[in-house]
Image: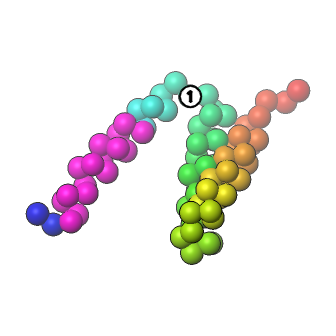
């Protein structure tokens, strides 16, 4: 069994479980999650893969994603 085959099923299962958890989320919640994911990837790339850069990017991305679809007062 190749490494790809060993990782494919758990990755697919994780993706299905993660996406099914988003069924009852509001638009603002979805934007927060998307922003955190994109921010984590960007933070990891920009910091050379450091954990602090990834966490910081996720935090900043989550805040930005949350504010994008914030209801007007």
Residue at 27% from the left image edge and 48% from the top image edge: 10
Q: Is 34 or 62 nearer to us in this picture?
A: 62
Residue sitting farthest toward the right: 73
Instruction: Say if the magenta span includes residue 58.
Output: no
x and y, in percent, of residue 27 in the image: 63, 32
Residue drawn at x 22%, y 63% as measured from the top left: 4
* Rendered-image quadrant of the C terminus: top right
State the predominant SS element of the stretch in magenta.
helix
Left/right of residue 5 with respect to residue 28 in the rendered view: left
Colour scheme used in the picture? Answer: rainbow
Q: Secondary structure at mark 1?
A: loop
- Figure quadrant of residue 32: top right
* Magenta range: 3-18
Front-lying residue, 23 or 41: 41
Q: Is residue 69 above or below residue 1?
A: above
Residue 65 position within the rendered picture, expressed as x and y whole percent measured from the top left: 69, 45
Q: Quadrant of the N terminus?
A: bottom left
Residue 38 horizontal/vertical position (percent): 58, 56
Q: Is residue 45 visible?
A: no
Q: Whole-percent x and y of residue 71?
A: 79, 30
54 left or right, relative to 5: right
In the orientation shown, which residue stands out farthest toward the left? 1
Residue that appears at 62% across and 72% down: 47
Query: Label 1 crowding class (10 Å Cα cut-off): few <14, some 14-19, many 20+?
Result: few
Q: How many marks?
A: 1
Is residue 13 visible in the rendered structure shown here? yes
- Extreme residue toward the bottom, this view: 48
Q: Is 17 inside the magenta-drawn segment?
A: yes
Location of mark 1 (residue): 25
Please say if 19 is above or below 9.
above
At x 61%, y 49%, the residue is 36
């Amino acid at each position: 069994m190749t490494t790809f085959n060993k990782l494919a099923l758990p990755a697919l299962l994780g993706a299905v479980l993660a996406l099914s958890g988003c069924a009852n989320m509001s638009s603002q919640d979805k934007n927060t999650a998307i922003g955190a994911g994109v921010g984590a990837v960007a933070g990891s790339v920009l910091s050379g893969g450091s954990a602090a850069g990834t966490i910081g990017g996720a935090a900043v991305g989550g805040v930005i994603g949350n504010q994008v679809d914030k209801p007007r007062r």
